Image (cartoon, rainbow, N blue to C red):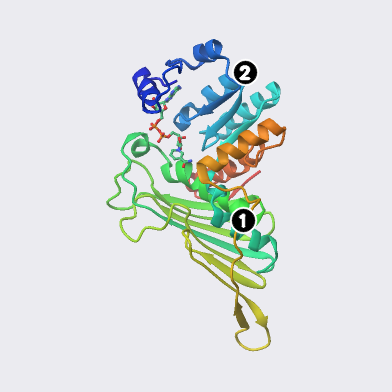
Amino acid sequence: VDLNKDTAQKRADEFKLASAKVGNDVRAMLAESKPEVVCDLTIPAAHAEVTIAALDHGCHVLGEKPLADSMDSARRMLAAAKKNNRTYAVMQNRRFNPRMRQLKRLISAGTIGDIVAVKSDFQIGAHFGGFRDRMKHVLILDMAIHTFDQARMLTGADATQVWCKEWNPKGSWYDHDAAAVAVYTMSNGARYTYYGSWCAEGCNTSWEAEWRITGTEGTVMWDGNDLFRCQRVAQRGEFFSKMEDVVVPPAEPDDRVGQHDGWIKDTIACLRAGRTPETVCTDNVKSLAMVFGAIESSDTGTSVPIA
Ligand SMILES: NC(=O)c1ccc[n+]([C@@H]2O[C@H](COP(=O)([O-])OP(=O)(O)OC[C@H]3O[C@@H](n4cnc5c(N)ncnc54)[C@H](O)[C@@H]3O)[C@@H](O)[C@H]2O)c1
């Protein structure tokens, strides 16, 4: 289904889905085809309308991030999932990166002690064209949701407070702010600092961002690709503690990985088994709250509590 039927037909042709029903009206298509699961791949502004229609038709929904384009829409979507006893899960594919799983395991094992500070740096010069070039808060709403969600996964904590400043750098090809810095207080007392730009030309980071995670017993760094560096305290007592290098252990067989594909397979497996998916809306809304807290802080110039 697409508002533009030709677009939907082209996609059906691309995947040689000769028997696929094609249309431009979600509600009509839901009534006609009665699916069990709907994948909402529309633009953020359409997520609430499409997902609520699908939930009200008794479908589970696998939706693209962000969960919603406002907290009000998010609340309506969560209420629709609850009322219909259906699952709405959100595509946070970066959790399913094998390096993220390794990092999470290392932190959970206590290798660097208790987390006290997390920093992520996201610098990409993305010339999309399309809706993003015109979108307000484009970096925070359309991209930083991934990075914020990664920060929640890595710290195992939720944000309680944020200060944020967005701006549109000189030379930006976006209509609105495409760069931001934000500092979060997390529920475990750690501070999480986000720095990002979607119009950074040159020396780009990976889409997963570059990370430095400092604990009471050491630090781990990840370049967002394949490179880790980890050191932990071997001995204290001098001006600098004596540090030892730590090799980040490989992913385990039961780590659920595979980016988009991995997330889809894992979420469908959860639905079949009656388990709650990792990125169910009732949890993912806490990542979305980091987005709208940051936007409110940037708009008002104040530090904002996150419920
Ligand atoms: N997880 C990821 O890695 C990732 C990557 C890219 C995009 N996304 C997300 O996917 C979503 C779509 O992004 P995109 O780049 O594919 O956008 P796009 O503009 O290329 O495609 C969106 C399509 O949705 C259609 N549409 C809009 N409103 C609709 C409605 N009410 N009913 C039916 N169709 C409707 C549009 O006609 C368009 O064809 C966004 O939420 C974006 O954030 C996620």
User: Mark 1 is on which residue type?
Assistant: Leu
As drawn, the label of residue 56 is 2
The reply to whether residue 92 is visible in this rendering is no
- Tell me residue 221's x, y (percent): 53, 66
- Tell me residue 18's x, y (percent): 41, 18
Q: Report whether 292 appears left or right of 206.
A: right
Quadrant holding the N terminus:
top left
Question: Is the CB of the residue bearing disc 2 within 8 angstroms of ligand 1?
Answer: no
As drawn, the label of residue 103 is none
| Of callouts 2 and 1, the N-terminal one | 2
Quadrant holding the C terminus:
top right
As drawn, the label of residue 154 is 1
Q: Report whether 237 appears left or right of 22.
A: right
**Circle 2 — which element?**
helix
**Dot 2 surroundings within 10 Å: few (below 14), some, or many (20 or more)?**
some
At x 65%, y 62%, the residue is 107
Q: Report whether 269 appears left or right of 33.
A: right
- Tell me residue 223's x, y (percent): 47, 62
